[in-house]
Image (cartoon, rainbow, N blue to C red):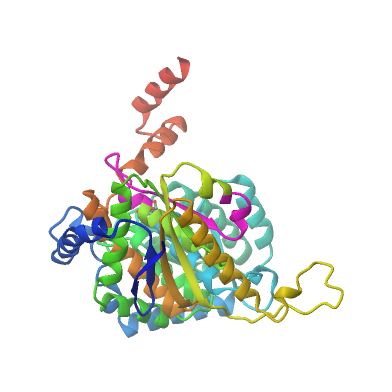
């Protein structure tokens, strides 16, 4: 049975899990929230995000908007260079608010992304597109030393300087990085770029409401004041929704549900799920613990992953991100011949069909043994995305502490880097290089 347990201003949840087990976790959730608030837990030097929304000043937002306007007015394209937390938040919000066909519609400055992979064709094709075009660069790296964005920046900076001259190029480059440390900070100082700071106490995956996310979102033409205002609303809210989500997912994890699938029925939310996966994956997946965060886009993936979810191994639960109102209304027409047999849908909005697909799927999956949480936002707007971002961040901190891990570090991401640098003979990695060569011989 699907039981509705809570309705709040932006989020309502339903689930099928033993409510007693969920309720039993309330003290743990409250203790975790207190640990966060008092800053007494592990990783407490990375809690800058906790009261970030309410601490962003009008002047800071106005400055970001002015820089964004300058880039928009002087560029056909602005390439945002960054990876992980220096990429996904901006990408998620821009995709959620943009037309699905924005790339094919002319008229305004387009935000493109680079440095989030090392695909040679990707960067080559981007450079082809930018050839002879007016473009700018927002380069984002907290450490200022991450390889993927550093390669993309070296290539695109060189191209921009050749196209526009060094002086003009410098006016079209904005760097977002640490206040003092890192190669990007030194380079920006030397070249005289406009810069923004990523606060020391805000980790990459919690940085979307700093200039890291706000500048690209503003360049794309969206209202960052409304985004921040939405986040402030949830920062000032009670923790009821946060507790419901954190308690439920931890109760499910304890009962053997090791995989959480974030489900959307709205194609624009694809990258929001990518942002969420990084937030939860990097925060919780450590010490051989943690729910594996996965995502699907329905109804598209009902025709691929639907079978597995309905009938596969029962180690999963779903969290459905449901959007109330669509931005458009499209009504299915009546067809006299009715050769496709669709007249039973004539006069209905496409979204009405989608909503029935959503409800039907949730009911089917619960019947199939897949517990289901529902998070509803009234519409895809800056305000509600701001609410959702802060809600997920807070719930992630609470959930991680409940699990017993430090949600704010990511020691595991260094392992591949060490091997890659050793394989590429980076100075300082001679011992690792030798060890790998030995391993590969076996
Ligand atoms: O969340 C994190 O800390 C990481 O995903 C980083 O954001 C990512 O590795 C990029 O790091 P940086 O911003 O230092 O280039």
The quarter holding residue 113 reads bottom right
Please state if 352 lies on the left or on the right of 362 as rendered.
right
Residue 132 makes an appearance in the image: yes
Q: How many marks?
A: 0
Q: Which span is picked out in magenta? A: 281-306
Residue at x-position 83% and y-position 72%? 338
Residue 198 makes an appearance in the image: no
- Quarter of the C terminus within the rendering: top left
Residue at far right of view: 337
Residue at x-position 35% and y-position 50%? 282
- Residue 291 on the magenta span: yes
Residue at far top of view: 442
The quarter holding residue 210 reads bottom left
- Foreground of the two, 397 or 150: 397
The quarter holding residue 112 reads bottom right
Check the image and report above or below for 267 versus 57.
above
- Quarter of the N terminus within the rendering: bottom left
- Residue 260 on the magenta span: no
- Foreground of the two, 266 or 168: 266
Residue at x-position 43% and y-position 72%? 376
Q: Position of residue 277 (x, y in %)?
A: 42, 55
Q: Position of residue 436 (x, y in %)?
A: 41, 24
Q: Position of residue 53 (x, y in %)?
A: 30, 75
Q: Position of residue 116 (x, y in %)?
A: 50, 53
Check the image and report above or below for 25 versus 375.
above
Check the image and report above or below for 60 versus 165.
below
- Foreground of the two, 79 or 265: 265
Please state if 115 lies on the left or on the right of 228 as rendered.
right
């Amino acid at each position: 049975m699907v039981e509705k347990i809570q309705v709040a201003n932006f989020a309502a949840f339903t689930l099928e899990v033993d409510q007693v087990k969920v309720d039993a976790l309330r003290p743990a959730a409250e203790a975790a929230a207190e640990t966060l608030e008092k800053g007494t837990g592990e990783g407490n030097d990375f809690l800058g995000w906790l009261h970030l929304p309410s601490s962003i000043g009008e002047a800071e937002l106005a400055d970001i908007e002015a820089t964004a306007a300058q880039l928009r007015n002087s560029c056909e394209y602005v390439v945002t260079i960054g990876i992980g937390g220096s990429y996904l938040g901006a990408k998620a919000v821009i995709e959620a608010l943009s037309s699905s066909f924005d790339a094919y519609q002319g008229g305004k400055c387009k935000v493109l992304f680079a440095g989030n992979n090392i695909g040679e064709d990707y960067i080559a094709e981007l450079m082809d597109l930018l050839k002879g075009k007016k473009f700018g660069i927002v380069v984002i790296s907290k450490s200022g030393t991450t390889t993927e964005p550093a390669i993309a920046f070296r290539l695109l900076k060189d191209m921009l300087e050749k196209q526009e001259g060094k002086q003009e190029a410098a006016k079209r480059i904005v760097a977002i990085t640490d206040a003092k440390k890192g190669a990007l900070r030194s380079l920006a100082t030397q070249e005289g770029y406009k810069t923004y700071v990523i606060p020391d106490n805000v980790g990459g995956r919690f940085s979307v409401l700093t200039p890291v996310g706000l500048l690209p979102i503003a360049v794309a033409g969206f209202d960052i004041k409304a985004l921040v205002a939405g986040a402030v609303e949830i920062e000032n809210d009670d923790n009821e929704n946060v507790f419901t989500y954190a308690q439920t997912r931890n109760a499910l994890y304890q009962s053997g549900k090791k995989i959480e699938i974030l489900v959307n029925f709205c194609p624009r939310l694809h990258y929001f799920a990518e942002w969420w996966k990084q937030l939860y994956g990097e925060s919780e997946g450590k010490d051989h613990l943690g729910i594996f965060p996965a995502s699907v886009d329905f109804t598209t993936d009902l025709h691929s992953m639907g079978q597995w979810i309905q009938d596969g191994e029962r180690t999963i639960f779903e969290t459905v991100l449901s959007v109330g109102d669509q931005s458009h209304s499209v009504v299915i027409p009546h067809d006299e011949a009715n050769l496709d047999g669709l007249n039973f849908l004539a006069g209905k909005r496409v979204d009405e069909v989608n909503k029935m697909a959503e409800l039907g799927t949730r009911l089917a999956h619960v019947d199939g043994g897949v517990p289901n949480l529902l998070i509803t936002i009234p519409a895809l707007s800056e305000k509600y995305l701001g609410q959702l971002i802060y809600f997920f961040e807070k719930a992630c901190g609470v959930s991680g502490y409940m699990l017993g891990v430090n949600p704010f570090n990511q020691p595991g991401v260094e392992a591949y880097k060490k091997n890659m640098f050793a394989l590429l003979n980076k100075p300082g990695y001679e011992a690792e290089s030798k060890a790998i060569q030995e391993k590969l011989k076996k």
